[in-house]
Each structure stands twice: as structure tokens, then as C-alpha cells.
Image (cartoon, coloured by chain):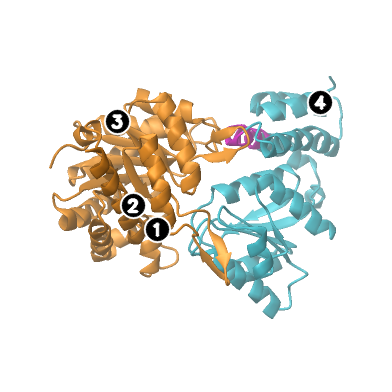
Amino acid sequence: MDLLEQIAVAMQRGDSDTIGQLLRQALDNELAPKDILDNGLIAGMNVIGDRYKKHEIFLPEVLLAAKAMHVGMDILKPLFLKDEVPSRGRVVIGTVQGDIHDIGKNLVAIMLRGAGFEVIDLGNDVAPNKFIDTAVERNAKIIGMSALLTTTMPVMKKVIEQLKEKGLNGRIKTIIGGAPLSGEFAEHIGADAYGYDSVQAVDCIKKLVSGS
Amino acid sequence: MKSLLGRLSDNEVLVADGAIGTMIMERGLASGKPPESFNLEQPAVLEEIAREYLDAGAQIIQTNTFGASRLKLAQYSLEGKVDQINRNAVLAVKKVVGDRAYVSGSCGPTGKFLKPYGDVETAEMFEVFREQIGALISAGADVICIETMSDLNEAACAVKAAKEFKSIPVMATMTFNRIPRGFYTIMGVTIEESLRGLEAAGADVVGSNCGNGIENMISIAREYKKFTRRPIIIQSNAGIPELKDGRVIYPETPHFIAEKAKELLTAGVGIIGGCCGTTPEHIRAIRKVVDAHQHSTV
């Protein structure tokens, strides 16, 4: 098994210590940071995502893999020149105003980072204008909104309406997720996508940024 | 008042209350504040909700303290008010129900993960629960209800913390998702594993709340019954929310839930109540079904 495969396997086990060792070894062997990222860390995270989607593994394995990803990125990041950290795109994410349930939102953030996206996490109880202002300021192309409560779901609609009022719809795309939501609701409020779970959310966002 | 566990062991079926959080929101919970802020600012609203559930026939009324642990309240910089928030919630319910119902001290997840998945040490988690549960008990709670748990280790921490106090009955409920190969919590815990862990920690009543409508809950109750002799508590959501004419509603009506509750009775469930989306009307309908059942079995 070559070094990159070993890194991917260690990622799947969520073995942060081994990730640290293998990454240093890979850098000593003069493997390119981008190669290590894509074919080691992200390759491992993709397997985690697939297995989670199939219910073969649960949240604990994902959380450990996310920690290992973090360790790996801490080592690799300084090696990329400032603007060259490979990013698939920038996503603003948060739980909507009035709602403080953030486990699902945090999972999506973890999986997005794992897939190579840059995530700006606004936390929970996020006001509509904060989503939009942040996306504009930071030049993010995607806003991801989460809600667990039926009472806070209408906030998502507000964000989408405000995007339209500002003429930003289409330029900034929206994806929603959360236990009480559905594709039907997403369509109803005019969201660009609905993520059933964190893995599917990442798949949808990949499609949204590539414009297909 | 007869002891809760004594009544359950005499095969009496008890009715618990329904949702609290959604009712507080309907009464104007401001954005950026937790439902527990009402305990400090508007305890009269808690009394009003308790009265509605008491009038509907609930014998176990929960306190508005689901998120009243130090770790959870810290999100609102209210971590210094754990005692007051829990105390006020118990007193509000007690004032209304007196000896006509049991005051159930609600204790939900902290929202943080234990090591190695998160950053919280087991000892700290234990202390967090002991602080909250201690406040609930000293204010006069009759029973502690540890609820909506996904992580068995966190749940066990809370049950053990409750068991540190005098002999107060402890109920513990987990939240399951149905996946093709059965029921699992998001942390991957099965019903059988939950039971083993909760019983080992000392839970007197075990069961499930939230996450499911009544039909899945019937399957969950049957699965629980296979593995335990302890009384079972089931608190179902009023279904999975759906969109109707542009509004979000919980689809399961009081009539539907009450009809299905008959199957919970057949499955041997000891306490039936409601979770998200259930109202005093749901509890009233369940009450009727439970009363009819008890008349037929006396």
C-alpha cells in the first residue's frame, strides 16, 4: 500500500496520530501537498461519506475522521501559498434565526471541509441579513441554511426573498437542510437545493458550484 | 400521592404531557433566547402550559428545563443561572399540579460530545448533569426524565448523576432513526445496547421520545419490550412535519395518535406522552384511550 493509500486508510479510522506521522513522512518523500490532500485526506473522507450515507457507520466515526482531517490540514495549510490553498468554493453556513439546533449544520460543515470546501460557519440563530452580508463580503457562492424547528423554517424563505430583492439570486445559491424539511419545501420557498443528509448536501453543493 | 414506580409495577398505565418548547414559541419566545429564559422572565406562562396539560389528563408534567444544563446555557451566557432556571421551572409546575400529577424534571443533551469525539471529559459531563439534576430535585421534582439522548455514554452520565441523589425515580429516553437494518441513534446505538447501558446506569424507566411519529414508536416499544422488564415510556412526535398550503404542520391528529396508542398499550408500554408537535388535545385523546383500556383490564 503506498503512502497516500495509507493516509486515506488512517483517515477512515479517524486515527489522528497516524495521520500526523504519515503526512510528515509523505512531505519528507517530497510528495506534493495538493496530492496528499486530494489523494490522501480527501480520498479517505470520501469513503467515510459514502459509508455514512449507506448507514454502515455513524456519527462517532465521522467525528473522528473530521478531527483527523483537521490535524492533516493544520500540517498542510502552511505549505500552500496564501491564495493557493486548493478550495472547491466558499460556503456560508448556519442555523437560521430562532433555532439553536446545530448538530446537523456542524456535520455538513465537517463534510464540506472534508470535501475541500472553505466553510464560513456563522453558528446558530443567524439573522437573514447576516447570511447575505457575509456571503457578499466574503464572495461566497453558496448559502447553506439549517433548521430543526418547524417554527423557524419560514426564516429560510426570508433569506431567499431578500436575495431576490437584492438581485443576488442566481449569483448566490441556496441549499437547505434539517429534520423537518423536504425537497418539496425547498421547491416551495425557491431554494436551489435540499440536502437530505450531510453527505447528500455536499453532493448537491458540488453540483451547485459546477453549475450543473 | 402513591409512588410513580409503585403504580407502574401494579401495571397502571400513566399519561405524560406533550410538547412544551413549541407551546412556548407560540407564546412569543424572542429570537436569540432559549425557551428556558421564560423560567426567569415569565414563569406564569409555564404555569399556563402545565395547567393545560393537567386539565387534559396528564399525570406526569415535565419542567421547561430541557436545555438547562450549564453547557447548554453557556451559549446564552446563562451558565451562572442553572439553579434559578431549574428551580423556577419546578416551582411553576408544582404550583399548578400540587399532588395531582408528578413533576418530571426534564434533562436533555448538553449539545457537546464526550471525548474522543468531542472535547468534554466524562467527569465534567457528570458534574454538569449533577448540578442541573441537583437543582431540579432540591426544588421538588418528583422524577427525573433524561431525554432525547443519542449518545449512550452521555445518557449514562446523566442517569448516574441522578442516582447520586436520594431515591428519586429516573426515566431515560433515547431518540432513534429508522434505517434499513433497524433502529439506531445518530451515534449508532441500538435499542438493545441502549437498554443495557441505561439499566446498568440505574434507570428505573426506559424508553424513547422524539424523532419519530407514532407508528415507528410502536415498533420501538415492541423492540424495547423484547429486552427489558422495566417500565417503558414512549413520547412520540405528532409525525414528521410537512407542508400544507404553504404552512408547516405536524400531520398526526389527536385522533390518529390516540387510535395508534392502543397498540402501545398492547405492547405493554407503561407511560404514554407526546413530544414535538403534540398538544393538550393529543394528550386528552390519549387519556381517553388509556382510561378505556384500564376499565377493560380491571
CA separation in Å, label 1 and label 2: 8 Å
Q: Mark 3 and mark 2 in contact (Cβ < 8 Å)?
A: no
Q: Chain of mark 2?
A: B
Write the start and end of the magenta stretch as one range.
A58-68
Compared with B261, A67 (above or below) is: above
Residue type at tag 2: Ile
CA separation in Å, label 4 and label 1: 55 Å
Q: Quadrant of the N terminus of chain B?
A: top left
Compared with B61, A51 (above or below) is: above
Do discs 2 and 3 share a chain? yes
Residue indicated by mark 2: B286
Task: Tell which chain the image draws in cyan.
Answer: A
* Residue closer to the observer: B266 or A164: B266
CA separation in Å, label 4 and label 3: 49 Å
Q: Is residue B229 magenta?
A: no
Q: Chain of mark 3?
A: B
Q: Is residue B187 left or right of residue B26?
A: right
Do discs 4 and 1 share a chain? no
Residue indicated by mark 4: A5
Disc number lying in front (3 or 1): 1
Q: Secondary structure at mark 4?
A: helix
Residue indicated by mark 1: B254
Residue type at tag 1: Pro
